[in-house]
Image (tube, rainbow, N blue to C red):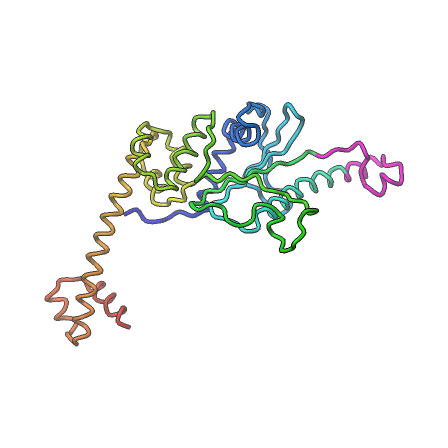
Amino acid sequence: MIQKENSFGTFDQEINAFFKDAHHFACLINTCLYQGQEIVKPQDLMLVDPKIQAYTRDVLMLWNGRYGSYYLGIENQLIENYPMPYRILQYDCLVYKDQMDILEKEHRKKKDLRSSEEFLSGIKASDKLIPCITIVIYYGTRPWQTNFSMKDMFDVKDVEHLNEYRMNLIEVHSDTHQYKDNELDLVFSMTRDILNANFNTIRNKYKQGIPKQVALVIASMAKDEELYQQIKEEEKEVIVMCESLDRMREEARAEGKIQGEEKAELRILTNLLKKGISDSYILEITGVSSELLMKAKQSIH
């Protein structure tokens, strides 16, 4: 059985690298925000530094397109995060604060503020900010259960007059969008089947080979450390996912058998020790290792 050597940090890196591709990113935005219309074009996207103030976003793009300039962000969630609406609000506000700081600095340098309103504001009435839109992609196996907007985080009876700040949330386990980008569609559909344990579907539907890097993204989205390591150690650059999953399950069954045999041996050794039989005699008649005998002795205490 392949040992677990991975972490959510590695999964995040794989997923972020996938969405830094302008074609994948544009297709996601077009599908989720514009009903599949090709409004955002890859050539109009520019990857920008995701670190703003002390916070680093997963992926941040500047879009200069049909409707003007926008910041478009993606936040990947491998597990549910209860204050996520607040976090997104905070991230977006930092994008605006960064722009405000730049505007105010430029005006101080130019000394071009004239009216009392301009001095009070620190900017001119003609100054505009670039809006920010963030999409949260959730890779959990269960539905997102808690907060979908800032309103959900308040415990009051009158929420009618509160700003909602609702998240743009995609839940991969139940996502039914059809993506025009083949790799993005494959990644989401196969991840969905793995999250829902539809292994027969995977075996019948995904017999074609896919690029190794895409397969690693799927394993990362599924949070499957064994599958990730299985693919990582493959020497081939084209992976047949149904074969990788079958190999992983065969190894798991073999490991389970070994663990079952060891468990039975430990029961026998524990009973012998409780009867006061010496270590040397137990080792002689059972043929087990001294390490396993020590493990049995530790289980008694």
Residue depicted at x 57% and y 28%: 34
Residue nearest the observer in this picture, 49 or 258: 258
Vertical placement of residue 158 versus 237, above or below: below
Q: Residue furthest bottom?
A: 276
Vertical placement of residue 299 versus 128, above or below: below
Vertical placement of residue 280 versus 129, above or below: below
Q: Residue furthest left?
A: 285
Q: Is residue 100 left or right of residue 281?
A: right
Q: Is residue 278 left or right of residue 122?
A: left
Q: Residue 56 sits in which quadrant?
A: top right
Residue depicted at x 50% and y 38%: 16
Q: Position of residue 55 (x, y in %)?
A: 60, 46
Q: Position of residue 137 (x, y in %)?
A: 51, 40
Vertical placement of residue 176 versus 157, above or below: above
Q: Is residue 28 left or right of residue 268?
A: right
Q: Residue furthest right?
A: 115
Q: Position of residue 187 (x, y in %)?
A: 42, 33
Residue nearest the observer in this picture, 203 or 285: 203
Residue depicted at x 55% and y 30%: 29
Q: Position of residue 179 (x, y in %)?
A: 47, 28
Residue depicted at x 62% and y 29%: 63
Q: Which residues are magenta?
A: 104-129
**Marker count (numbered):** 0
Q: In what quadrant of the picture does the C terminus appear?
A: bottom left
Residue nearest the observer in this picture, 22 or 155: 155
